[in-house]
Image: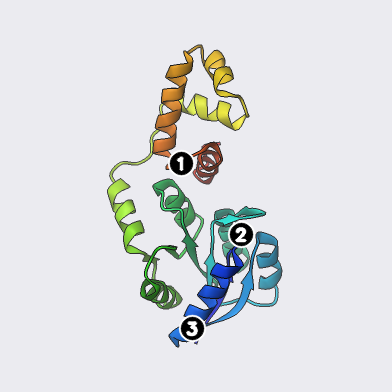
Amino acid sequence: MIHIVVVDDHKIIADGLELLINESGAAIVTGKAYSVAECRKLLKNNQPDVLLLDISLPDGNGIELCSKIKENYPRIKIIMLTNYGEFATISGALNAGADGYVLKNSEPEELIESICRVAAGERFLCEEVDATLQKNENNPLELTRREMELLQLIAAGFTLPEQADKMCLSYHTVRGYRQKLNIKLGAHNTVQLLQNAKILKLV
């Protein structure tokens, strides 16, 4: 029986996962945590075979937590279970040591398969994530000098008009650069843009 710990900030999702996994007959949930702090505390006394880890947590980033867990508990297999399906986020998670990556809209059978295969030492990507990686593997992320300059200004907290002033460009030109940055880093807002940039060590 594969022992599982679920880390998700939504209790209803964590409870649903526990029910699904326990009924599968392949694994059993031995612990649940709803934050980075709770996860760290739980792992001191409960090291599972597989950890299901969300990326967005109230007190930190699941990808950064993944990296720390791999440092402290290298035996634990980690599956990122999240709504984030952007290339930059997936790459960041895999670079941090994640053994699997499954989107929350995946079929229950696919999740159980991921647990079994990762526990057996394989890497598992759900179909949608696998397709995203294949689509982007021949198009590595490249930022222009201007895009990097803008990214640094965004990280420093400057507003769009201030960014335009510092770059000696028009408001509309900088807004265009910003739109390209969002597309390249798979972001929909400033928080996600900076999160993905941090994962990729661009800021």
Q: Which of marks 1 and 3 is nearer the N terminus?
A: 3
What's the residue at 70%, 77% (across, down)?
45
Figure quadrant of residue 66: bottom right
Q: What residue type is labelled 3?
A: Ala
Q: Which mark is residue 140?
A: none
As measured in the structure, the alpha-carbon distance from the residue carrying label 2 to the one carrying label 3 is: 24 Å
Badge 2 or badge 3: first in the primary sequence = 3
Please rate how many residues cluster around mark 2, counting C-alpha atoms within 10 Å: few if below 14, some from 14 to 19, many from 20.
some
Q: Mark 3 points at which residue?
A: 27
> Number of numbered discs present?
3
The amino acid type, in three-letter code, at marker 1 is: Ala
Please tell me whether mark 3 sits on a helix, a strand or a loop.
strand
What residue is rendered at 55% in x and 72% in y? 76
Residue tagged 2: 68
The residues bearing labels 1 and 3 have C-alpha atoms spaced at a distance of 34 Å
Q: Is mark 1 on a helix, strand or loop?
A: loop
